[in-house]
Amino acid sequence: MTTLIQLSVALLGGLLMSRIAKKLNLPAVTAYLVAGLLLGPYIIGAFKVPGIGFASEEQIEAFNLISQTALGFIAFTIGNEFRVEQIKQMGARAILIGIFQAVITTVFVDCALIALHFISPATISLSSAITLGAIAAATAPAATLMVVRQYKADGPMTKLLLLVVAIDDAVGLVLFSVSFGIARVLESGHVSVATVILEPIIEVTLSILLGALIGVALHFVEKFFHSRSKRLSISIGFVLLAIGISMMEFDIGGLHVGFSLLLVLMMCGTLFCNICDFSEELMSRVDGWTAPLFVLFFVLSGAELDLKILSNPLVLLIGVVYIIFRSLGKYSGAYICCTATKCSQTIRRNLGITLLPQAGVALGMAMTAVELSDGASVRNVVLFSVLVYELVGPALTKHALISAGEITPEGKTSARTKNKPSDKKLGIG
């Protein structure tokens, strides 16, 4: 009973907060995060009224399945952006930008934090500096997608952005696996080829294969049904199946093998949308079904934000350096790559800003990094950056898309009706 009340309060609280956000001209996703922060264990939850807010981190973690499910549907939705016609238009460009802006960001943060280590070794260890550099590469696809969907953003930069965000997380996963392997080598003195090279390659490969297999199976089963409601139910069933399998981990011959939930669901969505001739109509129905799920995801994400870290000067120092150099890396990396691939000046100026949000994927990496000698510091720095990026990132993404001319600010006429898909040509200079 209490659980249902908590979920209803979280859902209604997020939606009511979005009305305030609209008055302030802020994206709805920011409102959901703020609602979660208010309902979390440091504000309303601190009163420990049963069902009203979240009294502890354990209560929030109990809803982890909801967060994982929402993240899976978000990844599936992004996968549907990889349609053949779009890949033909900007596939090579998106891949190059996705890879190199992530690498450049990692280099920027690595250089800054390694320099901080040599200036003050007690502030941060070398292994933590290298690990944080890799975590910096990850971008939060959820916040970006929600802003795009809320304002019906459409145009060459929006299409490129969704492709880059998807590629970015795959690259971030590989960079983190390699960097974390090096960090463990620095601490233990033992070089493990399996940890540094084989495990990340196996994880990415298995995730892509699993996603492709489930995507093909989904299309095969869908063909036996013609009812829209049954096709919707089958789609949801297969996505839930993919999420469940993606959460499995096992050991084979001394190698720790797992899957990337984001990669599995993105690949599943990509295969499905390209081989199914009614995927667009079906996806619009899936989007309607998942709307409350996404609200809960962001409210729970807001509730997870740890305000205690704001009282730790060391975390704030490292966090500020991390945020500054990650932001510089994302912006300059995107600008350099866009220039090299001959994107328009508008895309060059704005794409990097839309890549700033950071959340779930980075937090997952930070939880893994806790194994390091000062891994708790890594986790707290990432928590601090997520607190900052999640509260300001969606608004910056909205501003960048407005600057690019791909969404119309909401006024007397809603952006939901004014911003309709168009056949804009690619922004190639």
Image (cartoon, rainbow, N blue to C red):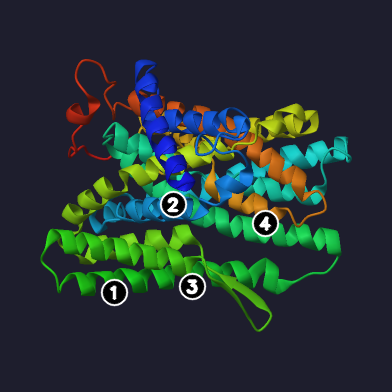
Three-letter residue code for mark 4: Thr
Height in image: 252 above or below 67? below
Q: Nearer the viewer, mark 4 or mark 3?
A: 4
Horizontal side, residue 221 vs residue 372: left or right: left
| Residue most extreme to the left | 226
- Spatial separation of the CA atoms under disc 1 and disc 3: 16 Å
SS category of the residue bearing label 3 = helix
Residue bearing mark 1: 217
Mark 1 burial class by Cα count in 10 Å: few <14, some 14-19, many 20+: some
Disc nearer the start of the sequence (2/4)? 2
Give the alpha-carbon distance from disc 1 to disc 4, as whole Å: 32 Å
Report the residue marked by disc 3. Answer: 206
What amino acid does circle 1 point to? Ala
Name the element at disc 2. helix
Please name which of the two marks, 3 or 2, marks the residue nearer to the observer: 2
Assign a secondary structure to mark 4.
helix
* Residue at 74% over, 60% down: 182
- Residue type beneath disc 2: Leu
Inter-mark Cα distance, 2 to 4: 18 Å
**Res 426 → quadrant:** top left
Mark 3, other Cα within 10 Å: few <14 / some 14–19 / many ≥20: some
User: Are dots 1 and 3 in contact, CB under 8 Å?
Assistant: no
Residue that label 4 marks: 368
The reply to whether residue 138 is visible in this rendering is no
Contact, mark 1 vs mark 4 (Cβ under 8 Å): no
Alpha carbon of mark 1 to alpha carbon of mark 2: how far? Answer: 21 Å
Q: Amino acid at mark 3?
A: Leu
Q: Position of residue 53 (x, y in %)?
A: 52, 35
106 relative position to 354: left or right: right
